[in-house]
Image (cartoon, coloured by chain):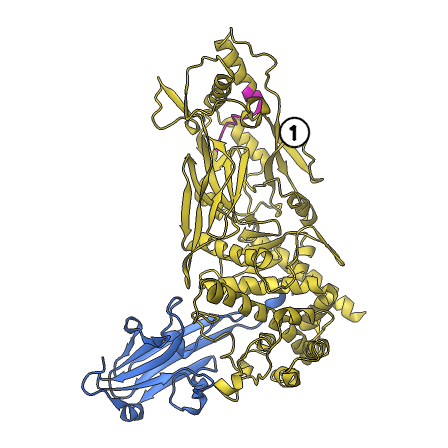
Chain colours: A yellow, B blue
Amino acid sequence: MKLKQLFLCVLYAGLFLFQLSCKDELSDIQNEEAFKAEKNSSLSAREFSGDSLILENPYSTENMAKALQRVKYNNPKYSFGKFNVQTTHLYLKFSPENEEQVSLLKSDSTIHYFDYRMDTEYKEEYLANRSPDKDSIPVYYTAVPVGKTLPAVKHEVLSELYIPEQDPYFSDIKDNEEYQVTDRVENKTDLFNNLLFSAYEQTGNEQDLLTDNATPEARWIFGSKWYPSGNIRVQDDIAGSRPVTGAQVLMRQWFTVAQGITDGNGNFSTSSVRGKARYVIQWERYHYSVRDGSFFQAETHGPNVKKQSWSINLNGGKDEYHALIHQAAHDFYYGYRFGLISPPMNNHFYNFGRQSQIKIAGRLSNSGPPSSYSHIRSEISFGLSAQIHIKNYGSTSDQVYGTTIHELSHALHSVKDRFSYDNIVRDSFLSGDSQVKNRNRRLLESWPVAVEILMTLERYRVRYNISNYSVYSTFQIVNYQNRTIAASNHYTSGIYDMTDMVDQRRTYGSAYPVDQVNGYTIKELENALSGSRYWNDYRDRVKAMYPNKPTRPFVDDLFANWQD
Amino acid sequence: MIQCGTDQEETKYFDYSIKNNSGSKIDLVPYFNGQANYSLKVSLAKDGIINLKKEVKPPYNDGLLMSSFFVTPSSGHLTQVEVVFNNTKRVIYQECTETNQCFNQPRNIFNPVYNDKEVETYTITSEDSQNATDCGGNCY
């Protein structure tokens, strides 16, 4: 009972401290009301206002109706039949109040959310450096077809939209390479192009449609659909320029979003768009989301172009950092992971409850509190804080990759057997007995060290065929083998040592672990986590589960290298 | 626990040095995967010293070893270090392996005795110079 009270006490103290630390990070940005007021006071469609470029919305149903009136006025003899402008989409702002509600939003992978407005252009540095809203949990913007079932999360309709590009009425129009707007309508193709151009022109956005050779007398616009495509690579410190796989590239044209996923060569293509659209890499997949800092969705913004592919080698800074974190997460969730179970899966029901999308905060820091995983931190802060924080900014690529794998391996452990995991964590940090702390903490940390080594080796030694690569490139501890017993009582090579053939004692001498164990797979070692509460408990479970392993008699010696 | 999750542990402060007390000018030439890389050579004047410091936090996948004076992210695996004295004599030290038990080689720069703590200094002495092999006029 006392232990429970102590735990709760520490929990609340932690929450208090957490809120304090977070308040330091929080500063106000314009709220919705301020934004509306600002927008209303701006008569010009394109006018810088602080960090944002406020745009008049060409797709509002109201504006489209006006545009249609203008087209009709110019073409009194054309039969418009039953065609009319009607709301096809809704531009929405969601304001989730907790992690559970964010999870509801992310449970539908057909809706793409942005944590900034879709009818506003921002200065590049603003999105890169913005501070979170004082409400703490970001608000999300999206546009959905009318009638779409919406998640039960507080939201408001910012605008009713008519998007002619998505209106089936125009599905059979001609796909001209270029189209000259003359205000004259003689067929459906003319109607589509004139309506669109009028809507853009009325709101001061016509440059988005006009071609480079257009003049006031000859208003040529992009008439044909085009298919955005490109290639995404990252400059890896060890392996050089390499494809980023599994990255989600969004092509955003106002409220229309086309999606592509990079393949094994980093290539992507999306469905078609017309006119100008912006490439955006959103570092998010269904099961995980990489955050820029603690709160906002990490994105890499590409060019706003017409009919151009986009190829980029992400080299340095936040974009490279986010790409590497994404790559590690993607490899763990969707790639080869030695048969291990997945880290926590979005919208998946475990025996302890439903799990939501894992948030991985890519902190731009290499100091202060270290990288970490905590499901409790996220739960008690109602999703305010990401479960995983990576603080390896400026480290070599393999260290960023390995640390991300390490933290995700904690997450894996936490869903493999939540009850045992929480028990290990509790005793690791709250026990008053240092021996209990050590024996728990050693199991807690040695598991992710093992997965970290194996998956980092897989990336560099196997996938990129760097035969002499060992973990890590600049800190040549040779897959944690060149590390004394005394170097760390918790972050040990002990679990990895059961999979490899190296006996450190023979190579480095008496200060190093004796390791005559080999022949275990990481999957077998994962299975032994279930029910294990501390170092020797885990040892005994490994021995009991795999009684026929030839090196089983040496397991006791291996585990005894590190004493409680 | 709530603040720092699973990886709260103490910071390690690494401080590594190589001192030249040999009485000669020396060059330290790293070999990666068995090949000398002269572009990453480290030169030390008589009585010279080089030093590296690094602060490391959990999960401790960074730090310093004597190899840290030579490696870059893309240099590859350091297999040997050649010490050249006044371009007249040399000694080559090889990394630790099961067949090259460097912990039995007192002057080997890879010997764990120079690599197993957070603060280490490897001092090259006049005795090292005396025990080095003559290059026959030019070591390069």
Relative depth, front residue between A172 and B68: A172
Task: Look at the image and tell me whether residue A368 can be seen.
Answer: no
Q: Please rate how many residues cluster around mark 1, counting C-alpha atoms within 10 Å: few if below 14, some from 14 to 19, many from 20.
A: few
Q: Mark 1 points at which residue?
A: A146
Instruction: Give the letter of the chain under mark 1.
Output: A
Query: Does A164 appear above or below A508?
Result: above
Query: Does A418 appear above or below A185?
Result: below
Q: Residue at x 51, y 20 (%)?
A: A192
Residue A433 image position (x, y, % from top left): 70, 79
The picture quadrant where one finds residue B7 is bottom right
The picture quadrant where one finds residue A360 is bottom right
Give the residues drawn in magenta, as a range: A54-64
Query: Does B101 appear above or below A474?
Result: below
Which secondary structure, mark 1?
loop
Residue A461 image position (x, y, % from top left): 47, 67
In the displayed orientation, state which residue is furthest to the right: A1
